[in-house]
Image (spheres, coloured by chain):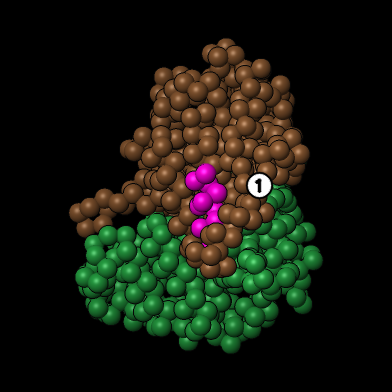
Chain colours: A brown, B green
Amino acid sequence: MITTLLNKIKETKAPVCVGLDPMLAYIPDEVKKAAFAEKGENLEGAAEACWRFNEAIIKATVDLIPAVKPQIAMYEQFGIPGLIAYEKTVRFAKELGLIVIADVKRGDIGSTSAAYAEGHLGSITIGEKQFFPFDADMATVNPYLGSDGVKPFLEVCGRCDKGIFVLVKTSNPSSGELQDQLIDGEPLYARVADLTSAWGESLMEGAWSNVGAVVGATYPKMLAELRARMPHTFFLIPGYGAQGGKAEDLAVAFNAQGEGGIVNSSRGIIAAWKQEKYQNFGAEAFADAARQATVDMILDLQRCIRF
Amino acid sequence: MITTLLNKIKETKAPVCVGLDPMLAYIPDEVKKAAFAEKGENLEGAAEACWRFNEAIIKATVDLIPAVKPQIAMYEQFGIPGLIAYEKTVRFAKELGLIVIADVKRGDIGSTSAAYAEGHLGSITIGEKQFFPFDADMATVNPYLGSDGVKPFLEVCGRCDKGIFVLVKTSNPSSGELQDQLIDGEPLYARVADLTSAWGESLMEGAWSNVGAVVGATYPKMLAELRARMPHTFFLIPGYGAQGGKAEDLAVAFNAQGEGGIVNSSRGIIAAWKQEKYQNFGAEAFADAARQATVDMILDLQRCIRF
C-alpha cells in the first residue's frame, strides 16, 4: 500500500491529504437544509448533510490529491447514521481512486485489536464468505497498550496490502504531557518511534514500510529528529495550516526525491469557504473554495519540498 | 454516575461487570443458524447472532450484576450491522437497569475528542433538538494524547452525569513496553495515574470521582500501588479469570466497605458453556451457563472482598 500511496503522491506532486472531518458548523446552510428536507432534522439528516458535503469536496479535489483522511469521530458523533455516512464516504473516495486513511486511532489488546484491524482494514469470514466491513486502505493506531495492540494490525496489513500510521508525536498542545517525558534520557515518543520502526521491518516495500508514524507539523524540531531516527517510516503529518504548522517547517520530513510523508489539512480545506481569504466563493461554491485551498496548499508545500 | 454504580454494586454485593464481547466462536451454532436464517449468512446475520446472544446473556444475569461492558471492537468488526447490534445492546441493558460501560478506548484531540465524548456519552444538537447517539453511562478513554484528549470527556461527564475510566495500567502482557517505562524514577502509568486523579478532582461525588482508571487484574502489585496512589479513583479491573487475574490479588483494590472497583469478566462468563466446568449445561443453555459462571465469580470475589 505504501508504494501505491507514494506513486500517487508523485503523480500529483502533492503530498497532501484532505481531512474529511465534517462538523455541522463547516457545512453551508443550503446543504444542511436540503439534507434535513429529505431525511429530517435529526441524526439521519445531519449525516446526510455530512455525506453531501464530503461528496462535493471529494469531487472538487480528486484530481489534485492522492488521499483523504476521514476522522471517524466526526461521524460517530451522529451515531449509526453518521457511521453509514462514514462508510459511504470511504467507498466513494476509493471508487474515485483516492487512498483512504481511516483516522480511527484504535488500539486495544489481542483479539480486540484484531477485531478493529479486520473491521477497518481487513475482512471477516462468515460461513464460507469473506466480508470487508469498512475496508479503508490505511488506519491510524494508538500505541499505549504496546505490541499486543499493534501486532494484529500488522497481520492484516501483510495479508491485505494495507498500511497503518502509529501515533508517535501528535500535533496537539498537550501531546508532551506523556509523549515528551524522558525515559533513560530520551522522550517517550522516541521509544514509540523505535517500536514503530521495529514493527515496520516485516512490512517493507522498497525503501518504505507499511507501518508509518503520525508526527505533528506543529513540532518541527521533533519532526526532524524523528525523520533521522526512522529513515524507513513514512509520516502522516497533521497540524498544517489551521493548527499552525508551516510548509517551511515540514520540509525536513522529506528526502531529496520528495518522499517521506503526507501532510493533512482538514478545516483549512473543507471549511475554506468560511475564511476571509476565500470569501469571494460564497457558501454555495464551498467545494470550489476547498479546491482553491487545496491548490494553494500544494503550491505552498511545493515551494519547500523538492520533487 | 459513580454513586449510582456504587449503589448498584452494594445492592448486588457484586463488584462485577459482564463483558459483552461477542465473537462468533462464542455463539452457539443454533443461535447463529437462526440469525442467519432470518438475516442471511452475512454481516447482518452475524450482527443479529451477536444481538440474540447478548440479549439472552443480559436477561440471564441482570438480577446478579450492576453493569455490563460491551467492547465496541467486537461490533465494529461487523461494520454497520455490528454497530447497530452494539447500539441495541446498550439500549436494552440500560432499559433493564444495568449500567453500561462502553469499552471504546477513544482518545483524540480537542474537537475530535469532543465528538467522541458527545457521540458515546453525551448529546448533539441538530436544529433545536437534542439527540443522544449511543448514550452509554461510562466509557474507557486512552490518555496518550494528554489533557487535550480527556478534557472534552470531563465536560460531557459533568453536564450529563456520566463517567469515564482512563487507561492507566492495562492487563495485557505487553502493557509494560510503554506503561512501565521509568520517568524520573517512576513508571509512566504512575504519571498517567496522577493526571487521572487531577482530571477527576472537579468530578467528585462523595468519596469517589466520576473519572476512574483501568487497572489490570493481572498486575496485582501495581494494583495495590495505584490504589494507594489514587484514593478517590474508582477502578475498572479487567483481566480476571481467562486472562489470569485472581480474586485474592484483586482484594487490594477495595476498601473495608467493599468499595473501590468493579471487576470485568468477558470470555469467562459469556463463553462459559464452552468450558469443561460448565459443559453439563450444553450449548442450548449457554445463558444459564453464563449465569452460573457469574454466580461463581461473585462468590469467588466475596471470599476476598468485604461488604
Mark yes or no: residue A116 visible: no
The residue at 59%/14% (across/down) is A306
Density class for disc 1 (Cα within 10 Å; few <14, some 14-19, many ≥20) is many
The residue at the point 33 percent across, 69 percent down is B48
State the residue at coordinates (31%, 69%).
B49
- Residue A256 visible in the snapshot: yes
> Label 1 is placed on what type of residue?
Ala
Judged left or right of residue A95, residue B228 is right
Compared to A12, does A238 lie above or below? below
Q: Is residue A95 magenta?
A: no
Which image quarter: residue A280?
A: top right
Give how far across and how far down residue B169 sits, in percent.
Answer: 60, 54
- Camera-nearest residue between A130 and B291: A130
Which contiguous range is marked in magenta?
Answer: A45-56
Q: Position of residue B270 (x, y in %)?
A: 38, 71
Q: Is residue A54 magenta?
A: yes
Return the residue found at the far right. Answer: B202
- The secondary structure making up most of the magenta span is helix
Q: Where does the C terminus of chain B fall, quadrant-wise? A: bottom right
Residue designated by label 1: A283
